[in-house]
Amino acid sequence: MTEPLLRIRDLRVDVQGAHALAGVDLDVAPGAAVGVVGESGCGKTMTALAVLGLLPPGGRVLGGSMSFAGVDLRTANLESLRGNEIGMVFQDPLTSLNPTMTIGAQVAEPLLLHREVSRREAWRTAEEALGLVGLPQPAERMRSYPHQLSGGMRQRVAIATALVCRPKLLIADEPTTALDVTTQHQILELIDDLRRQLGMALVLVTHDLGVVAERVDEVAVMYAGRVVERARTAELFNHPRHRYTEALLAALPERSARDLRAIPGMPPTLTEELAGCPFAPRCAHTTDQCRDERPALTGDERHAWACFHPAPPVPTTVVTQPVPEPVGEQVLLELDSVSKDFPLATRPLLGGLTGSVSAVAGVSLSIRRGEIFGLVGESGCGKTTVGRLVVGLEQPSSGQIRFDGKDIATLSRAERKPHRRRVQLVFQDSAAAMDPRMRVGAILREPLAIQGIGDRREQRRRVAELLAEVGLPEQAVHRYPHEFSGGQRQRLGLARALALRPDLLVADEPVSALDVSVQAQILNLLRRLRAEHALTYLFVSHDLAVVRHLADTVGVMYLGKLVEVGPVREVYREPRHPYTRLLLDSLPSAGAHRSSTAPGGEPPSAARPPSGCRFRTRCPRAEAVCAEVEPPLTTDGGRQVACHFPG
Amino acid sequence: MTRFLIRRTLQALVVLLLVTVIVFALLHALPGGPARAILGPRASLPQIEQFNHDQGFDQPLPVQYLSYLWHLLGGDLGQSYRLNQPVLDLLAQRIPKTLVLTCSATLLAVAVAVPLGVLQAVRRGRFTDHLLTGLSFLAYATPAFFLGLVLIILFAQTWPLLPAEAPQSAGLGGVFAGFGGLLLPICTLAAGMIAAFSRYLRSSVLDNLTEDYVRTARSKGQSERRVLVRHVLRNALIPVVTLLGMYLPALFGGTVVVESLFNYPGTGLLFWSAAQSSDFPVLLGVTLVVAAATVLGSLLADLVYALLDPRIRTVR
């Protein structure tokens, strides 16, 4: 192996008393692409920040070595390396650009700092860089401010800023996590292209195994502040050796069958020094040796792991599709050309309304009792509004919502209260939707008290029952919502929703904020609860893999319209609407085969949707008729699609 | 932008009209009234009635108000009872002096508070921060009249460096010639502002330092100083500008105290003596000017806000 460009040995970092990094080893060869993956808190971002000396307040390098191109990073003048030899791209493009500086000034800044160039030259080079990252009309964009660009465009600007000095190494920390799936695909392709074009090395930090799967040469898996496994990418996905990697891959919804193999428990808190393997408390293969001794990375250059009892080198489970649960024929929820218009924001400087936007524009769908209906689409497509309409948080502008055969708009006051019991909502961060000053016991009892169910003693018993059902200890009633971890918060949210024994649960991105291993626990719980309580779900998500795993039926939304509906298995195997195909092609998938068609463009504004078919501006099949006639949602053999030229 | 300005001006006019109504009603609800104040306690009842008839005070209040308004539209703010001068002339003479005082105090406050606030934020939790925080609270909690007295005792009596009285000349030239006499009033007026602004800026800078864009700025390889000046300061100043606009009325309240204390013949002193002698036309005139200044101040704050923050500027 050639001399590595970046070489990290036994790096130890403390952040406010927590051992964020407990001995990280990592090599990046010149021009190579290395993925660093792991769940939140595993230290992947800290590793990246430590390289640039950008640790958060309270962060301190305790020991170990870091060198970049032969320079010791612990003693080097990092200011001369940052933005010059090493570029960095951060997660959230909405917040990582200075809101009060023009794009041009921000992209040109590293040049002015590190290169002896005039302002004019810097400006010109910055403009070139914007062109390089595919920003349309770079010359005009130079004078724009960040808020005038979409998230994807801002991330392109951030990448241009990182690359403008042609660094030898680009560190990208979750560069696409805040973006929609089609935009994510574009940005990943862009980084790929630029890396080859400029011959730079790449460290891609991500929680998403799918993102690294076909993008990098080598993957390092981190857990509890250490690299526990490192291998060539294909080798890692096909033959994981460390038990954690093995378990993590098995917990991916796109990889497994019926029940996900969730990893029990949670990653260790990093405040205590761990004697043995940090994964030992959650591992199915733990022995005394694991608890007492710390395993070192063993293996060769191609593949190394830090595990005493590695998985045998055989292929892991093949992808199998879930078999749908038997679903009843009775329709529980029916939407009949439901629309919801929102007034556009008033102009703060001028006043007055300027029109309205149809967040939901004529959506019809029906959900049968016991069904899990997955509603997917990119941000702003109206899927969340559909959920809010169904639970009655919003009133439709037109159209009918029928629950159990009754139009919910015509319910009398007396009928409304029992109706509310039957439809409940689960949020993305359920605990954030709870009163932070109420204890869990009071939170869970509140719906029972409001609906006047049972006396205090019965209510308490019911609360205990609910906690047991979602797998939380009984003592949880005395604690406050913020004391729980992400997965536990979601369990709480489910317990609260279940308190009134609803028929329909509307779950809005319930697992989006969770790590893979915890996500699997919640998905399994959702599935179990449905079976035990004959629940029906409207499952709103941007994550196609999760919907494929959980749902029976999937509905795809684009700019307020439902463009395709059908049984999950058929839609994923053979999408008929070109937008569905685009979504599926963009989906990063660990191990699955990916087509290389780069999706075009960004969704237009819902305030001014294109005429005719709303997708036509991005559609490869679009013809003249698509601009004139809006395709209706037509049924064909159990599947519905709204396209003039369905595939 | 033009439409925005027109709208705001119309709004301002409505506000001013409401101010006249309220002040007019309040003044006339006061016991005693100008006749007693001007003619003295020994004036007989017929004399008072004669005065009230001459001034039109025996007419119904709405009629009096409309008559005042009518004159106001003609640019006539009335005649001071006590000084026997047109209110307009009095204001024209006094306002520039108060402006010299308040503008100097504001400039001083901003010039001191900005570096102080940034320093506190950068040294957060260390000795400098604690010391400055303590001093800020002290300055903020000290009433202006007390601070003024302390300053007079220290710098005019113990160490006679500065005069205890502000310049008395009628013209602005004299004021600038004797600017040394204004230093104590300016400092008295600025102390509270420095405390308020630096505290505000401190938390604003701290908020901004944790923002992602600051990390991005660091990742470009800039020095910490450059990050602060080029990136953080502008963003941190945005909320402070709003505070400045809102501070204007309080500033006038300060001038009433400070001008009386240092016997500076500005608008504040005019207001104070007019209030003591129920000099209605003067009170109304000053109130109108202050109200107009307040409205103008918040308008200016909005404009500067838009200048600093492009997200406000380009909303369409």
Image (cartoon, helix red, strand yellow):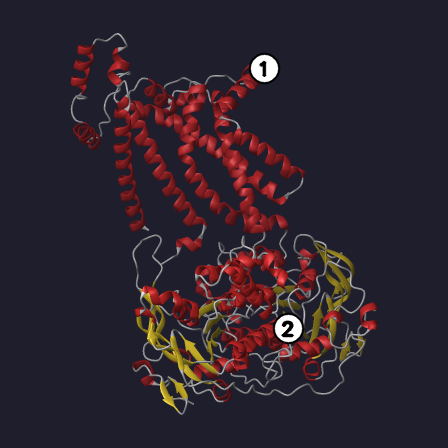
Q: Chain of mark 2?
A: A
Kind of residue indicated by mark 1? Thr
- What residue is rendered at 63% in x and 37% in y? B130
Same chain under badges 1 and 2? The reply is no
The quarter of the picture where residue A85 lies is bottom right
Discs 1, 2 touching: Cβ within 8 Å = no
How far, Cα to Cα, is label 1 from label 2?
75 Å
Q: Chain of mark 1?
A: B
- Is residue A24 something one can see in this rendering? yes
Note whether B77 is above or below A152 in the view shown: above
Local secondary structure at mark 2: helix
Of residues A103 and A257, which is closer to you in this image? A257
Q: Which residue carries the number 1 mark?
A: B158
| Apparent side of residue A525 relative to residue A31 in the rendered image (left or right) | left
Q: Position of residue A173 (x, y in %)?
A: 62, 66
Crowdedness near tag 2: few (<14), some (14–19) or many (≥20) residues, C-alpha within 10 Å: many
Q: Which residue carries the number 2 mark?
A: A517
Crowdedness near tag 1: few (<14), some (14–19) or many (≥20) residues, C-alpha within 10 Å: few
Kind of residue indicated by mark 2? Ser
